[in-house]
Each structure stands twice: as C-alpha cells, then as structure tokens.
Image: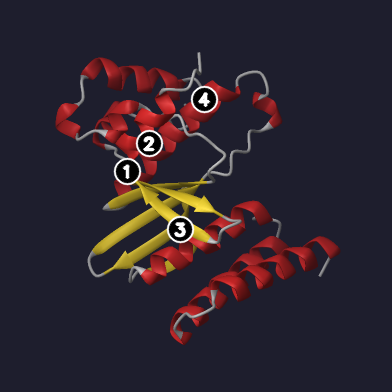
Amino acid sequence: MSPSSDKFAGDLATLLASISKGLDNGVVKQLASLRDRLVEMNRNRLVKINHSVMELLCAKHLLLKGYQVSLEHPLGDILVCDLYGVKGEGKAIVEVETGYTPPSHALDPSTYNKARLASKIARYSAFCDKFSVGVPPFHLLRIPRPFTQPVRNRNSKDLEEIKRLCDLYYRNPPITLEQIRAARIHTLFMIDVDGLRVTEIDPEGYYRVVSQASFG
C-alpha cells in the first residue's frame, strides 16, 4: 500500500476500535467488513478519509437500529448511494455531505451546494422509504423548504423554483418536476466525529434554525 493508503487504513482502524467498545460481536464484525470495503475502495482511489469516517459512524447508527447496511451501494445504472440500509421491508438511504465544494464552484458555492442537495433529495429519495442526509455540526445545509413538508402542503411555484435551481447544474440527465414533487428528506444525521456519535434531527426544525442565518 502507498503511505496515503496506510494512513487511511490506520485512521479507520483507530475509529473502529473506538466505536466498537461495548458492542455485540455481530455488529463489530459487520462494521469491520464495511471498514475493509472502504479500505479497498481507497486503494482504488474511489473514497477519501473524511467522507469514509462519517460513513462508518452512520453505519454503526443504522446497524444499532436493526438495519443491514451496505456502503457505496448502486441504485440502478447511474446512481450510487453512500449508505443503503434494509430492515424488513423498509429501505433507508443516507447521503453524507462533508461540506466540500469543488474549486470549479469557488465563485458560486452557496447556489451550487443548494442545487446539489436539492438534486440528491429528488433523485435518491425515490429509491427508499426513508431518505436522510448526514452532515457534520459545522456545515449548514440549505434545504429547500418544500422537501421538509408533506407532499400535500407544497405549491407549484416553490417546486418550479427548485426545478430552475437544479437546471443550473444538472441537465444530463435533468431533474424532473415529477421527481421534485414526490421527493422528501425524512431526517438529518448530525455526525459528530469528535464525539463519535450520530444524532437524528427533524428536517423542519433544522430548516427553521438554519433559515435564521443570513445567506443572501
């Protein structure tokens, strides 16, 4: 392995040792298997450490809630979700946002990140019963308000505004109005890496807190 791969594997080994304390052996084995998958993907330059650490913490949270969990799970021919959980007939998807913005969007980071989040909610939530976004405490997500509300409470003007936002960056394939109309975020995973814990937060309450900040 390269020095960077060695560091990646070592960091995940340290994390796994910390979050495994007091857990059932079966859960620990599942976490170790997920850790091994991330290490292998890092060797192929497919994942990075910040994102992977958050994924492993989210995986523990889902496992303790009774889900069977896979990471970097394919959804159809195009999409790959960060975490995919199955419990009985129920399916859950968690997409992890680290707060990273590509250099190509240095001049429009707020608009780009809002559109990126809207597109994820619209596309991924169709594949599950419960769609969540994982985020560190220091990164504020700009969730479009309609996605926090029941479908029956949304109006066409707001949905069309989300469509225009997504069209700025996503046209191949485009996000459809039908996808936007049916989409919803069910919960937020607040991922505290330093404290080794994940807390679920209601999106509507989160939206109210974040909307008090000035974004322009």
**Disc 3/disc 2 C-alpha distance (Å):** 22 Å
Residue tagged 1: 202
In this rendering, does residue 170 appear at all?
A: no
Q: Determine crowd level at label 4: few under 14, some 14-19, many 20+ residues with C-alpha closer than 10 A.
A: some
Residue 83: numbered disc? 3
Q: Could you tell me how far apart the alpha carbons at marks 2 and 4 are, in whole angstroms?
A: 25 Å
Between disc 1 and disc 4, the foreground one is 1
Q: Residue at 54% across / 76% down in the picture?
A: 20
Residue at screen point 54% across, 63% down: 56
Disc 1 vs disc 4: Cβ atoms closer than 8 Å?
A: no
Whole-percent x, y for residue 132 in the image: 38, 48
Quadrant in which residue 103 is drawn: top right
Judge from the rendering whether residue 56 lies leftward or rightward of residue 47; answer left or right: left
Of mark 4 and mark 3, the one earlier in the sequence is 3
Name the front one of labels 2 and 4.
2
- Are there few (<14), some (14-19), or many (20+) residues within 10 Å of tag 1? few
- The residue positioned 17% from the left and 27% from the top of the image is 153
Task: State yes or no: discs 3 and 2 in contact (Cβ < 8 Å).
Answer: no
Name the amino acid type tagged 1. Asp
Q: What element carries label 4?
A: loop
Element carrying mark 2: helix
Q: For the residues marked 1 and 4, what is the alpha-carbon distance in whole angstroms?
A: 28 Å
| Image mark for residue 206 | 2
Amino acid type at circle 4 is Tyr
Residue 169 is marked as: 4
- Whether residue 6 appears in this view of the structure is yes
Q: What element carries label 3?
A: strand
Q: Nearer the viewer, mark 1 or mark 3?
A: 1
Q: In this view, does 194 lie above or below 15?
A: above
Residue 91 percent location from the top left of the image: 30, 60
| Viewer-closest of 99 and 197 | 197
